[in-house]
Image (spheres, rainbow, N blue to C red):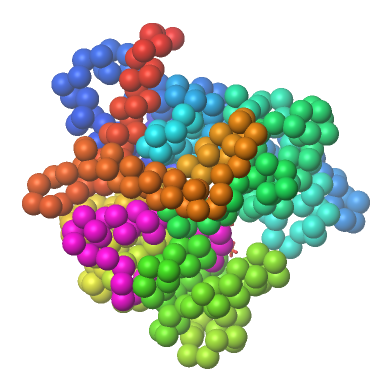
């Protein structure tokens, strides 16, 4: 806290990991001697820059942009870009730190980074968004590269924004390389990238359930968010025989006791992404459903839960409500959606709890596959990629078991993910000697 004043999100993320790592390295001299955890918790560099853009009325606006390059011990920095008014250095440092462990867990050669700007895309015209993205890349381009740092999308940055930024990168450098992932299929993108995070979070949930002799058939799922991760998580729940009953956005949540079908989910995707609408309108469109303004869905009774909106959206009280209402498993689609108290409630109740760094790694894993396809100038089929995604999620689950099994069939996935991710990065750092 003293080293990072006014950075609560970053301190929270490091604290959560440190709890497990201190225990693991207690008898391992070399990790102490070389201060490995402290080194991973100090980003290699944080670049902060000004982003100027012109709005439609001709006014010049000034925003702040960042790229946090946390650690490249096992591969080029890799992690998304977030455009949201609450983006700060603390939020991006926490995300880049988490990303380092997550990327290691995928088994692919990727380091950890994250970036973004305190730009609010809501209410902006397409032209304004384009100008902002171009201006952002006019500075960012000098810090990234296919073998250096490969950004992707995150909240507020989807395929459209990646397209504008890739276009600007190419314009400035004259290089057509895999410098960004999440690209359109016409210019080097990968199939199933949009689906990968949400699908992956559900595959991970299915792995946890299978480990305890359960499956998703007939299970009621409570999901938050209505963006990329949430809608694809809902879709995969339906594919595997489950029933998603909620979605949300920053205005509140909708409850559909009949369950969201694939058609209803498609409506939400079109509504939120293409029409830029609000989730409240779902209740006007589909009879029997209700909208709950300003509320989160954690009081709705369910078997499984998938928080897929944003950090710290589920606190201790929410966690107690979920446990009391019969939830047996939770998979974090978003990054750090459950605060520390909530995580402890789930651990104490011994419910299956998958932290984001394991559960939502499917997106970055397919981004890693996009990098491979770009550098070898080939593309895999949808079927091949679906299988690779499943195998990667299953591999992450197995890695979590290695360090997370606590006896009596209980698996502490937080500990498993923290230690497995840490060990891979730490061992590479040890191999490089003291820097
Ligand atoms: P989107 O921008 O597509 O969707 C975000 C959703 O979360 C929207 O429904 C948004 O509602 C809601 N939301 C945002 N902020 C808040 C808030 N403060 N309170 C309540 N709801 C909020 O983002 P993604 O689906 O891509 O990302 C969601 C989460 O998943 C993030 O934590 C992200 O870091 C994580 N993630 C995403 C990956 C990906 O591949 N996309 C990969 C790994 C993790 P509204 O429309 O009102 O803003």
Return the x and y of residue 140 as percentages of the image width and height.
Answer: 70, 32
Vertical side of 33 occupied by 346: above or below? below
Task: Tell me if residue 226 is in the magenta stretch.
Answer: yes
- Horizontal side of residue 190 vs 343, given as left or right: right
Vertical side of 28 occupied by 209: above or below? below
**Residue at position x 64%, y 50% in the image:** 157
State the residue in front, 272 or 180.
180
Q: Which residues are magenta?
A: 201-230
Q: Quadrant of the C terminus?
A: top left
Task: Tell me if residue 301 is in the magenta stretch.
Answer: no
- Horizontal side of residue 238 vs 163, given as left or right: left
Task: State ligand 1's quadrant.
Answer: bottom right
Return the x and y of residue 400 as percentages of the image width and height.
Answer: 27, 42
Vertical side of 295 occupied by 126: above or below? above
Q: Quadrant of residue 65?
A: top right
Residue 63 in view of the camera: no
Return the x and y of residue 327 as percentages of the image width and height.
Answer: 26, 68
Vertical side of 306 occupied by 414: above or below? above
**Residue at position x 39%, y 34% in the image:** 107
What residue occupies the far bottom of the structure in this picture? Answer: 287
Residue 428 in view of the camera: yes
- Horizontal side of residue 157 vs 324, given as left or right: right
Q: Quadrant of the N terminus?
A: top left
Return the x and y of residue 318 as percentages of the image width and height.
Answer: 33, 65
């Amino acid at each position: 806290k003293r080293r990072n004043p006014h950075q609560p999100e970053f301190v929270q993320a490091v604290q959560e990991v440190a709890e497990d790592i201190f225990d693991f390295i207690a008898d391992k001299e070399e990790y102490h001697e070389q201060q490995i955890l402290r080194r991973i918790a100090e980003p290699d560099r944080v670049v902060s820059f000004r982003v100027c853009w012109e709005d439609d009325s001709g006014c010049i606006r000034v925003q702040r942009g960042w790229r946090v390059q946390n650690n490249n011990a096992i591969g080029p920095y890799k992690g998304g870009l977030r455009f949201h008014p609450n983006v700060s250095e603390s939020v991006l440092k926490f995300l880049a730190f988490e990303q380092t462990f997550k990327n290691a867990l995928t088994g692919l050669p990727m380091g950890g980074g994250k970036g973004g700007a305190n730009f609010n895309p809501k209410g902006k015209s397409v032209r304004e968004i384009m100008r902002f993205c171009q201006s952002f890349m006019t500075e960012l381009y000098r810090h990234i590269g296919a073998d250096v740092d490969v950004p992707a999308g995150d909240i507020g940055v989807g395929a459209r924004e990646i397209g504008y930024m890739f276009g600007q990168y190419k314009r400035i450098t004259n290089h057509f390389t895999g410098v960004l992932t999440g690209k359109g299929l016409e210019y080097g993108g990968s199939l199933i990238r949009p689906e990968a995070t949400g699908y992956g979070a559900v595959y991970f949930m299915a792995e946890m359930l299978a480990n305890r002799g359960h499956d998703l058939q007939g299970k009621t799922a409570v999901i938050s968010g209505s963006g990329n991760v949430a809608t694809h998580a809902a879709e995969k729940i339906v594919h595997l025989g489950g029933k998603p009953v909620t979605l949300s956005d920053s205005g509140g949540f909708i409850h559909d006791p009949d369950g969201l079908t694939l058609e209803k989910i498609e409506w939400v995707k079109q509504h939120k992404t293409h029409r830029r609408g609000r989730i409240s309108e779902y209740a006007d469109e589909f009879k029997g459903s209700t909208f709950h303004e300003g509320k989160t869905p954690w009081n709705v009774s369910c078997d499984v839960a998938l928080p897929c909106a944003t950090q710290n959206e589920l606190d201790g009280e929410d966690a107690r409500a979920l446990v009391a209402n019969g939830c047996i498993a939770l998979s974090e689609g978003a990054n750090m959606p459950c605060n520390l108290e909530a995580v402890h409630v789930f651990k104490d109740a011994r419910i299956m709890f998958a932290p984001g760094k394991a559960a939502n790694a499917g997106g970055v894993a397919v981004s890693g596959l996009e990098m491979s396809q770009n550098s070898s100038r080939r593309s895999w089929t949808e079927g091949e990629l679906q299988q690779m995604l499943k195998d990667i999620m299953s591999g992450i689950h197995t890695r979590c078991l290695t360090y997370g099994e606590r006896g009596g069939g209980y698996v502490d996935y937080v500990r498993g993910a923290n230690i497995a991710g840490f060990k891979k990065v730490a061992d590479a750092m040890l191999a490089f000697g003291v820097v």
